[in-house]
Image (cartoon, grey):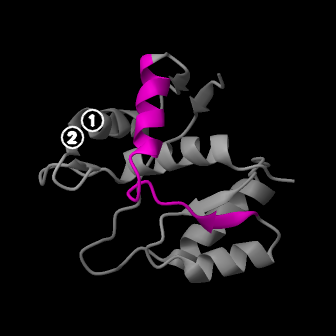
Amino acid sequence: MPAFAVPLAFTLQPSKTHNVSFADVRAWILRLANEFKFNIASITYDGFQSRESIQILSGLGFHTYANSVDKSLQPYEYLRDCLYEGRITFAPAEPGVELLRRELVGLEMRQDRRKVDHNPSFSKDCADAVCGALWAATRVRTR
């Protein structure tokens, strides 16, 4: 079975006066690839206002697609299995890993909606991103 490393985990929070800029997110991805030489095999979005970014990054040669972890239980079941089997390592000094840990611990199965969700006092954006990345890594063949 494959093993995974999570070297970085974080979320972008909008300010009270400004939304997160999708153009800035795309520029950051390009900087990771071009300046810092990250080998980016694919880029996925959860579907929220993502069509433009998918088109732009695809036009720049990246393998891109929508990948929601909320349409099926399989992605979170896979993440759970990887965690229980010890197949995920996290960067110990990465501050975002603590946020990720809190989000993962706060997840709950919503039987009424057959969905993994969070209670109103938590979020799950970082957990969704890591879950989606693992799910995509096991499902997508690129280049």
Image height check: is 77 above or below 87?
below
The residue positioned 48% from the left and 64% from the top of the image is 46
- Residue 86 image label: none
Quadrant into which the N terminus falls: top right
Instruction: State the separation of the CA atoms marked 2 and 1.
Output: 12 Å
Image height check: is 41 above or below 106?
below
In which quarter of the view is residue 27 placed? bottom right
Marked residue nearer the N-terminal end (2 or 1):
1
Q: Secondary structure at mark 2?
A: strand
- Residue 102 image label: 1
Indicate whether residue 97 is drawn in magenta.
Answer: no
* 5 relative to 13 in the view: left or right: right
Residue 115 position in % (x across, y down): 28, 51
The residue positioned 48% from the left and 77% from the top of the image is 21
Q: Mark 2: which amino acid?
A: Glu
Residue that sits furthest to the right in the current view:
143
Q: Secondary structure at mark 1?
A: helix
User: Disc 2 designates what residue?
Assistant: 108
* Residue segment shown in magenta: 63-84
Indicate whether residue 78 is drawn in magenta.
Answer: yes
* 1 relative to 96 in the view: left or right: right
Q: Residues within 10 Å of mark 2 (few under 14, many from 20)?
A: few
Image height check: is 70 above or below 49?
above
Q: Mark 1: which amino acid?
A: Arg
Q: Residues within 10 Å of mark 1 (few under 14, many from 20)?
A: some
